[in-house]
Amino acid sequence: MSERRETDADDHGVVTFPPERPLRLDSGAQIEGLEIAYRTFGRLNADRTNAILVCHALTLDQHVAGAHPVSGKPGWWQGMVGAGLPLDPDRHFIICSNVVGGCMGSTGPSSINPATDKPWGLAFPVVTIADMVRAQAMLVEALGIERLFAVIGGSMGGMQVLQWAVDYPERLFAAVCIAAAARHSAQNIAFHEVGRQAIMADPDWRGGAYAELGARPEKGLAVARMAAHITYLSETALQRKFGRELQRDGLSWGFDADFQVESYLRHQGAAFVDRFDANSYLYITRAMDYFDLSGAHAEGLAAALGRARDVRFCVVSFSSDWLYPTGESQGIVRALNAAGARVSFVEIESDRGHDAFLLDEPVLRAVLAGFLESAALVWGAA
Amino acid sequence: MSEVPIRPDFEEILRLVRPGSRVLDVGCGEGDLLELLTRRKGVDGRGLEISAGGVSACLARGLAVMQGDADRDLDYFPAGAFDYVILSQTLQAVLRPRHVLGELLRIGERAIVSLPNFGHWRVRLDLLLHGRMPMTAALPEPWWATSNIHLCTMGDFTGLCADMGLAIDACAAFAGGGQARAVEPNRRLENLRAETALFLLRRRVQPSAAGGPPGP
């Protein structure tokens, strides 16, 4: 470990793995000198039985709670991680790491390629959800944890949770998969392709080599974010928030942001480019598109999840999430039942779309708290 | 700790279920029975519940419950996954009672099923005297508001069990909020006296191996 700041409750650092311990990727390539940036909350107990890994979504990062070092904003799951909350640093040792391919300190396309001393750009190998999970498993091992109490995540984080349960069933006790799917649908892939094409159509993308050429494809990345952001909301939520409200009195009779919803989306796009790397967006969306848990198993999802039959699952969906609709979670639940796993499942009523898992959602909090508490009772007795 | 009195049908289920067994409660509501079974009988309990509110309440209590529908979601469980599958006051509200009953005894070694008895004397009298759909303690809603779409009498139910090759290992009758009374399920008198009835069922013959769940 090159850098590890041992403060008490809130620790962050980067683990650098030696070149002789490369990350072997699904593509056949490998990453030498892998770096994984992470943040932890709470303390690992003497038995090392209170560790919870949180897996982040597409554009999020390891700053699940506490202030974000770049934006200064509170962590992305501030309502779920903290004293008295379901993930409680007073009881749990909470770990969240930036995925491989990301841009918040873990090795990704904006890292320096040791072979060229330049940013990787498109020379960075394509990574998968399983590769992200393999890197997390290396980190968890480096932190001295043999078995995690729980792995928890929403959206892409939920995909990682499923992958964890299939690839390392003996290394986790409980799994919480929120607003996710066991494979990317044609519609999911289609929206991601719009985003990628927007980035690659920006002249400043420069074939992916913008970093070494001193450019930034901000326009393309902003458009990608705007399109994606719509998929995170619901029609009801958009209508309620903006309706046809105008920014100013009257129409501009031009193409300014007349409508409040246009201005909102432009703001979302502009804010995003300050904190995210365009190539990371390409790589991570690709990883999600390639995700198909049953793909490797001829007998389907139940066969894939059969390996995870001893893991205690909690699956959650939201009624207005049309990006990863309830049917996707039901497919996971049915496969887990067929595999004989112990699974809880609830579709939470919400009109806030896919983003509901990140927002203040008292039902999700109660469900998560109840699930973790009962799991802890059994885990403690085991 | 002082306890609220337990519903007589729950009391009877607690009596029937073997300690430490695997139990699925179909239509588990907010998990009152599951919690009792877990606490008193140390069962490995799971629930299936159609309402999000019920499921959330169960999960917040630490119970393992899935949101789902008895008509469709039982199909996805493997055969013999549970020692007991409980269906309390719900069979009359499902779309395909015969299919559901068959599924209960595919995924469970035994099933515990309770029903409002449409053969109860008060029901018969109500219909005879007034010519209207009966409203009783066990059937409190008017015909246009009830979710009961497949009401039957004890006689109807025991007939279906015979038809499906199911053995009735125990039968209890309830009336007037009183305690369970062990009864002979095929006696015509009981079909008059029982307001609700509870049955412990078992398959007479093992189902063929081909009866497994469809792939999801």
Image (cartoon, rainbow, N blue to C red):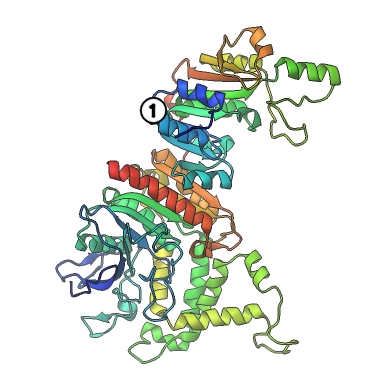
Q: Residue at x 70, y 16 (%)?
A: B119
Q: Residue furthest front?
A: B2
Q: Is residue A307 above or below residue B132?
A: below
Q: In the image, is residue B105 above or below residue A110?
A: above
Chain of the residue on which disc 1 is drawn: B
Residue B191 appears in the rendering: yes
Q: In the displayed image of the protein, which residue is found farthest to the right?
A: B130
Determine crowd level at label 1: few under 14, some 14-19, many 20+ residues with C-alpha closer than 10 A: some
Is B159 left, or right, of B204 in this rendering?
right
Q: Is residue B209 above or below residue A43?
A: above
State which quadrant residue B140 falls in.
top right
Where is A120 relative to A22, above or below?
below
Across and down, in percent, residue A265 comes to 58, 78
Q: Residue furthest left?
A: A20
Mark 1 is on which residue type? Answer: Ser
Q: On the rendered image, what quadrant is the N terminus of chain B found in?
A: top left
Expressed as whole percent of the image width and height from the top left, the position of residue A249 reads 74, 87
In this rendering, position of residue B62 left or right of residue A114: right
Residue located at (51% from left, 77% from top): A224
Determine which residue is flagged by label 1: B21
Q: Residue at the spot x=36%, y=51% of the render?
A: A296
Give left or right: position of B127 versus B169.
Answer: right
Residue A315 is situated, as x and y percent measured from the top left of the image, at 46, 50
Secondary structure beneath label 1: loop
Towards the viewer: B95 or A289 = B95
User: Would residue B22 be visible to someone looking at this image?
Assistant: no
